[in-house]
Amino acid sequence: MTHRFRTLRSLFLISRSGTPRAAFLGSSWPAKMAAPVGKAARGWSVLALGLRSVVPRLPGLTQVRWSRYGPEYKDPQIDKEYYRKPLAELTEEEKYEQELRKIQLIKAAPAAKTSSVFEDPVISKFTNMMMKGGNKVLARSLMTQTLEAVKRKQFEKYHAASAQEQATIERNPYTIFHQALKNCEPVIGLVPILRGGHFYQVPVPLPDRRRRFLAMKWMITECREKKHRRMLMPEKLSHELLEAFHNQGPVVKKKQDMHKMAEANRALAHYRWW
Amino acid sequence: MLKRMTRLVSGARQLDPGRLLHGGPQAPQSLAAHPDNQVPDGSPRAVSCTSEGDPARHGEQHEARHYCIPLQDLRTTFPHGLPPRFGMQVRTFNEACLMVRRPALELLRYLKNTNFAHPAVRYVLYGEKGTGKTLSLCHVIHFCAKQDWLILHIPDAHLWVKNCRDLLQSTYNKQRFDQPVEASSWLKNFKTANERFLSQIKVQEKYVWNKRESTEKGRPLGEVVEQGLTRVRNATDAVGIVLKELKSQSRLGAFRLLVAVDGVNALWGRTTLKREDKSPVAPEELALVHSVRKMVRNDWHGGAIVLTLSQTGSLFKPRKAYLPQELLGKEGFDALDPFIPILVSNYSPKEFESCIQYYLENSWLQHEKEAPRVTNSREESPHINRLTLERVLLYSDVSTWLGDIPWEILSCKSSALAQYFKKGRSEVAPTSSESGSSGSSAAEAAAALH
């Protein structure tokens, strides 16, 4: 409900930073235009239909994903520890920040984020990537079944192993998951660059978020495609995660292939200009 | 999963506040105070497990404790397999630990005092989903197996009334249908469970299978079972014969018979099976169901009948239904009347403690998190049973769905968890540190909400 209220409010505010467009829909709200807030005072150019900042109409700059929140909306602070710190321990900046948050506008926290101790951004991201058609319940249940499967397999291995090996067997599914994805991250990637009419695969260092994305994407694609028709996702995914944890398996192989291709194309590295 | 979890939130039962503690030493004492036979009190498993492996000697002092069934006994006593989630747990922990609970103890007391001259008494275990009816039945079956009874165990009657590929018209009675696959698998398991009786019991009539094969009077029952296994077409008839013979011979006193049926409401419900002309098949038209219905009547003596109602797997019954009248319907209730109903309820705080302790001892809780102190402020009891607890602990971040769930666990005031966290991880489990999956997140939620 809060979100709807906020979006109504945001109708009267300027939309995105930098675009001096009026954020009003249609001419049915002429009376409310009398109270421009914040940056709207910069001046707006009036559009007949009052569309929300689509101009300049350049093909590359059309906004595809845009938020109903204006730039003055701050992200919510989910971390409970932030609020638990006693007043004595806060530095000047932190005190100022906390005071500021009481006045600032804050976005609504997304439904999938919680302040639980078990909140894991990597797992949430992976679940979202596994989700199809918005079926978060299914994706979430698959994720938990996968973690359960990983845990049970490790427990069986643990009980079957000798005393010395037992110390080396990792039974925490979360550490296995994180380590497996870390093992699948490529260090260097290939980017098609157009030179002289041809596209060349140029080796390029990847930013962190791209590496994490690629690791998760490869894992999910591998599990979706290369499995028997009757095998279920948790079973296959748990198997792949365990293999990646031990630096084996097809996903790690794909990462290594990527590295080899980058190594092979290292002569083209000077095509990169950034 | 969200919907399943909301069951925990509904309703509130008042717990006696005397049991609830602020992480003090009282609850473990209530478990450890009862004299345990062999396990020394200092060992970590004294709290949740007992070394008393014989169900005949289980009593009040063993309540809420786990006891282990040796794995080789599992194969002979439960050849059909245990309920799937329990089977997974057995494979994971490499041991089969059942909790000794009040309904099972009550049943064991009745069975120990059975008068075998009177007609067989019917005991019906009923309760909400996930409360432990099937495992209580398994406890009773283990007891009877140890006491050398003949066990007639049907692990899930619902499997006989749905998803049956081949229905043959019965040779014995044209109106009925045979189910060769189900019957032959049941015969195989029956043979594994009761090997020693099959040669002792003799058939009292001549049975003609077809033009060439027949079983003479006085042959051991094992031959009938073999016939059913080799000629799958006759499997259902073999099952019928076995049941009839056992029923008539149990009064002679050579053996004591236990009839254990899980999901007995399937026998009087509806089926999803259809004939070739797509008309539905009623359960009494299935020969297997017909023979089991005769078995469950109390017109024989020399044993006992233990039944379980089950909504899971039932057909055309509402999800919340758990009472005998609702699940059996009028027909079933009249057929089973009179019976002794035994309610199996959710975990009491002591049982919950024991369960958590068991998980902690097996280092099942693996999530690495700092352990906050366990605070407790609510007194409403959650509806916790093994099913929900298992799910909560397995998924351990269920609080990301509903802040209430760890609340519910928390409000049980698990002193086992509190003790554990107070001590710190290193003392209890050096390699695998874990959080109170539920307890700590509950504590967090509790602190955040206030």
Image (tube, coloured by chain):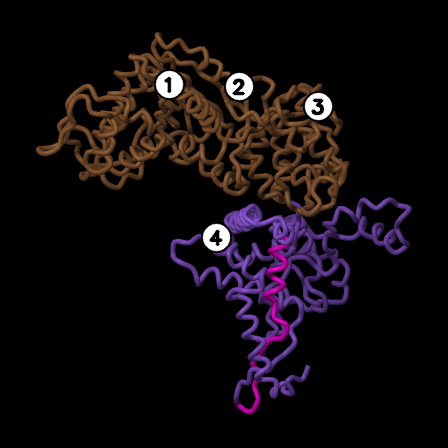
Chain colours: A purple, B brown
Q: Which residue is mark 3?
A: B29
- Which range is magenta? A174-197
Q: Which residue is mark 2?
A: B57
> Of marks 1 and 3, which one's residue comes earlier in the chain?
3
Question: Does the CB distance between marks 4 and 2 fall below 8 Å?
Answer: no
Q: Which residue is at 22% across, 28% downward?
A: B285
Disc number at residue B305? 1
Residue A49 placement: quadrant: bottom right
Question: Does the CB distance between marks 1 and 3 fall below 8 Å?
Answer: no
Q: Which residue is mark 4?
A: A235
Element under label 2? helix
- Is residue A189 a member of the stretch shown in magenta? yes
User: Which numbered disc, 2 or 1, marks the residue closer to the eye?
Assistant: 2
Where residue A186 appears, as percent x and y from the top left, is 61, 70
Question: Does the CB distance between marks 4 and 3 fall below 8 Å?
Answer: no
Where residue A182 appears, as percent x and y from the top left, is 63, 63
User: Which numbered disc, 4 or 2, marks the residue closer to the eye?
Assistant: 2
Residue B97 placement: quadrant: top right
Marks 1 and 3: same chain?
A: yes
